[in-house]
Amino acid sequence: MIVRGENVPEHRRHSRTFSAMTEPRWLTDTEQRAWRAYLDSTRLLLQALDRELVEDSALSLTDYELLVRLSEAPARRLRMRELANTALATRSGVTRAVTRLEEAGWVRRSVCEDDRRGMNAELTDTGQAKLADAAPGHVAAVRANMIDLLSARDLESVRSVGARMRTHLQAASDA
């Protein structure tokens, strides 16, 4: 959480985002409430979606997302690094998840044809069937826990804010 200056550790006082030379722009009460509502609701939503998938389909939210990304890719195949980039995940995390999915028979790995050093992850027919089986329950959970709680205007605001934040954060990580 965002704290006022007296509790900031020494190493943070001299970081790029918190300089001892300038007083930070502390969050107002309104900003603090918005930040905490966003953080809490996002965490609770991800927990609820993960719990639904595990209980209903024996898939984690991460596994489901990787299956979705592969299902949307040309020939249901992506290079491992592309899969990590599209899922906004670390390469090591994707490698571990793909290993689980491969053991279940839902994904297979193959050597990249254009670069023999790289590996592809490819959605199998069994993986496509698993995804098709899991999707209705997942969509129902997304609707019940987010979409149906929002008006059309709210949805556009969420989309717009999310897009702005994603663009900003991706640009910062590329810098």
Image: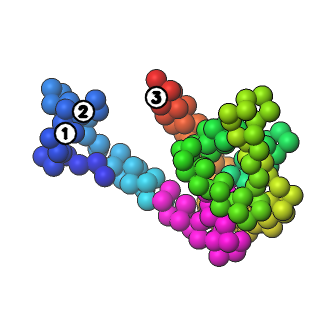
Q: Which residue is mark 1?
A: 11
Colour scheme employed for the rendering of this structure: rainbow
Badge 2 vs badge 3, beta-carbon distance below 8 Å: no
Q: Choose between 22 and 96: the one closer to the eye.
A: 96
Which quadrant would residue 135 be assigned to in this image? Answer: bottom right
Q: Is residue 83 visible?
A: yes
Mark 3 sits on what residue? 172
Inspect the image, locate mark 2, and give the three-letter code of the amino acid beneath it: Ser
Q: Could you say which is closer to the camera, residue 29 or residue 67?
A: 67
Residue 37 in picture, x, y percent from top left: 43, 56
Query: Which residue does the image show at 48% across and 59% down from the upper left?
Result: 43
Q: Which residue is mark 2?
A: 15
Quadrant position of residue 149: bottom right
User: Is 70 within the magenta?
Assistant: no
Q: Is residue 57 magenta?
A: yes
- Measured Cα–Cα span from mark 2 to mark 1: 7 Å
Left or right: 34 in relation to 87 = left
Q: What x and y, as percent, mark residue 74?
A: 83, 39
